[in-house]
């Protein structure tokens, strides 16, 4: 496979091409090290081949902010295998070339600071990571990592909640790179049966302010959810249900979720 330049520009190019083809974006989330470090690349390859537009990789952490029970348990299983951030980055650096989809790492400030901000960004770039989600990094404190992040060409993806004011939405949307992660529920991650009825109005406002694709996440667990969300958003992020399906070796459900994004 020819060498691909990864980073923010690569993610933007893949997302733009997807939307220009009148397709929607599907980003599955996995917990790195769930099943051991050796399971990481086969899982990424499986999701890549199944048609994921990009893949979000969670880094196991002892004090997650918004993770529901399924992702918390996956993180606990990963930590029990002894997997570390260094091991995850090393594994990606070794085999990133086998994955076509952009890769987004979801981690917290503490592991980045422990690693060293400049060194983390340098190693992340070398490992072929395209974007970062750091849920406990407030917009006002982005300057802590901005210079290093920009030097190494990584996208910093922002999350926006249902309860954010219009002014806050505008600030977050304008700052987000790669895509804007629109949280569709008030609370933690995990499967939901229903969503608030005024999501269409909310997403219309987000689209007004955002220059990058707007993706819906949290609580999306069925093909019907994917279909309904992709009517109002540019795509979806699915986490807990992907983890459960991987645990159950239910590849059919994973394919059904991914295929539902374009069944409007």
Image (tube, grey):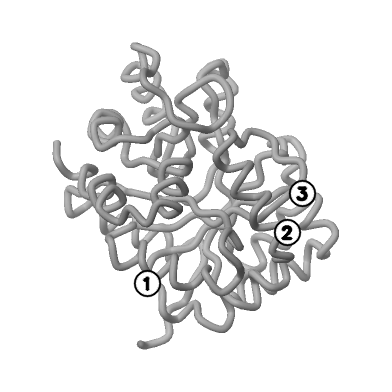
Numbered disc in front, either 1 or 2: 1
**Residue for badge 3:** 109
Dot 3 and dot 2 residues touching (CB under 8 Å) = no
Q: Earlier in the sequence, mark 1 or mark 2?
A: 1
Is 64 located above or below residue 88 in the figure?
Answer: above
Q: Residue at x 38, y 28 (%)?
A: 208
Q: Which mark is residue 100?
A: 1
Q: Residue at x 51, y 34 (%)?
A: 173
**Residue for badge 2:** 147
Q: Earlier in the sequence, mark 3 or mark 2?
A: 3
Dot 1 and dot 3 residues touching (CB under 8 Å) = no
Numbered disc in front, either 3 or 2: 3
Circle 1: element type: loop
Pointer 2: residues within 10 angstroms few (<14), some, or many (20+)? Answer: some
**Marks 3 and 2, how far apart in space?**
15 Å
Where is residue 81? Give x, y as percent: 69, 64
Image quarter of the C terminus: top left
Circle 2: element type: helix
Please state which of residues 93 and 125 is positioned toward the viewer in this rendering: 93
Q: Is residue 36 left or right of residue 25?
A: right
Where is residue 12? Give x, y as percent: 40, 57
Is 6 located above or below residue 245 in the figure?
Answer: below
Pointer 1: residues within 10 angstroms few (<14), some, or many (20+)? Answer: some
Q: Residue at x 42, y 85 (%)?
A: 3
């Amino acid at each position: 496979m020819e060498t691909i330049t990864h980073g923010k520009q690569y993610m933007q190019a893949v997302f733009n091409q997807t939307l220009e083809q009148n397709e929607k974006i599907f980003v599955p989330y996995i917990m790195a090290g769930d099943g051991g470090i050796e399971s990481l690349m086969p899982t990424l390859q499986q999701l890549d081949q199944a048609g994921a537009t990009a893949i979000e990789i969670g880094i196991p952490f002892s004090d997650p902010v918004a993770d529901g029970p399924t992702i918390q348990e996956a993180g606990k299983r990963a930590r029990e295998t002894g997997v570390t951030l260094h091991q995850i980055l090393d594994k990606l650096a070794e085999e990133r070339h086998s994955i076509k989809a952009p890769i987004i790492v979801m981690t917290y400030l503490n592991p980045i600071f422990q690693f060293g901000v400049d060194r983390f960004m340098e190693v992340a770039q070398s490992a072929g990571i395209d974007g970062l989600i750091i849920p406990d990094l407030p917009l006002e404190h982005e300057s802590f990592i901005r210079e290093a992040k920009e030097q190494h060409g990584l996208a910093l993806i922002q999350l926006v909640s249902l309860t954010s004011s219009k002014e806050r939405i505008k600030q977050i949307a304008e700052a987000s790179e790669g895509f804007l992660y629109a949280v569709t529920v008030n609370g933690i991650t995990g499967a939901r049966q229903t969503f608030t009825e005024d999501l269409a109005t909310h997403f219309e406002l987000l689209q007004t302010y955002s220059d990058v694709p707007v993706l819906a996440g949290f609580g999306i667990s069925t093909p019907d959810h994917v279909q309904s969300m992709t009517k109002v958003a540019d795509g979806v992020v699915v986490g807990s249900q992907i983890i459960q399906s991987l645990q159950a070796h239910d590849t059919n459900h994973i394919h059904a979720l991914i295929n539902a994004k374009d069944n409007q």
